[in-house]
């Protein structure tokens, strides 16, 4: 059997999880499922027409990046003593499930395939710019307010 060292330095055997790792895994799963369901609900509420610009995915990804900017400033700079499950639940879990790189890639492929290459290229360029601007802007604003 293979042994490995979990984050807390204790040794364990095989694929068993420590109690702490199980809590983190549960937090990521709960947050991720909730984030993905929220994104899916938004896509039903604000669907992208065939060949149309995927505004929903762009807004979701930018909003998720803004939220992670706020979260990271709060948990790493403002409230360093946050509960250890806050980042896994909200950051990796909810925001990881809410934002979507795969849908972004599929949206670009579909736009190009149906003859909207310019729109696809614009979306390809706009998304990372919007995402970076959102995370930087939100982090900056959070630092100013907090």
Image (cartoon, rainbow, N blue to C red):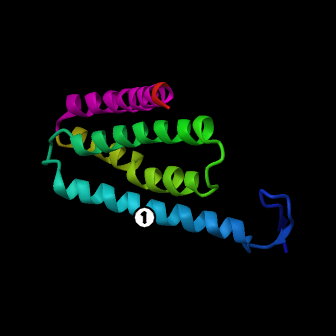
Q: Which residue lies furthest to the front in this view?
A: 146
The residue pinned by badge 1 equals 33
Asked whether 91 or 144 is in front, the reply is 144
Structural crowding at the residue carrying mark 1, measured as other residues with C-alpha within 10 Å and reported as few (<14), some (14–19) or many (≥20): some
Identify the residue at image location x=18%, y=35%.
116
* In this picture, residue 98 sits left or right of residue 123: right
**Residue 136 belongs to the span the image colors magenta:** yes
Does 129 sit above or below residue 24?
above
Q: For the N terminus, give its image quadrant.
A: bottom right
Spot occupied by residue 51 in the image (x, y as percentages of width and height): 15, 43
Q: Can residue 119 be seen in this view?
A: yes
* In this picture, residue 17 sits left or right of residue 127: right
Q: Can residue 54 be seen in this view?
A: no
How many circles with numbers are drawn on the protein? 1
In terms of image quadrants, where is residue 41?
bottom left
Identify the residue at image location x=26%, y=28%.
122
Does 86 sit above or below residue 126?
below
Asked whether 20 or 5 is in front, the reply is 20
* In this picture, residue 84 sits left or right of residue 27: right
In terms of image quadrants, where is residue 73?
top right
Identify the residue at image location x=43%, y=55%.
97
* In this picture, residue 64 sits left or right of residue 18: left
Spot occupied by residue 92 in the image (x, y as percentages of width and height): 53, 52
Spot occupied by residue 84 in the image (x, y as percentages of width and height): 64, 55
Identify the residue at image location x=78%, y=61%.
6
Question: Which element is circle 1 on?
Answer: helix
Task: Tell me which segment is drawn in magenta.
Answer: 115-143
**Residue 13 belongs to the span the image colors magenta:** no
Does 140 sit above or below residue 33?
above
Spot occupied by residue 39 in the image (x, y as percentages of width and height): 31, 55
């Amino acid at each position: 059997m293979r042994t490995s060292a979990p984050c807390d330095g204790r040794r364990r055997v095989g694929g068993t999880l420590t109690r702490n790792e199980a809590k983190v895994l549960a937090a990521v799963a709960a947050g991720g499922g909730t984030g993905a369901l929220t994104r899916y609900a938004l896509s039903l509420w604000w669907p992208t027409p065939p060949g149309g610009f995927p505004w929903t995915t762009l807004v979701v990804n930018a909003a998720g990046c803004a939220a992670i900017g706020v979260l990271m400033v709060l948990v790493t700079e403002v409230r360093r003593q946050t509960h250890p499950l806050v980042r896994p639940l909200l950051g990796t879990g909810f925001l990881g499930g809410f934002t979507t790189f795969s849908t972004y890639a599929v949206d670009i492929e579909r736009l190009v395939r149906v003859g909207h290459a310019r729109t696809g290229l614009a979306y390809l360029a706009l998304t990372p710019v919007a995402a970076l601007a959102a995370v930087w802007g939100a982090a900056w604003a959070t630092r100013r307010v907090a």
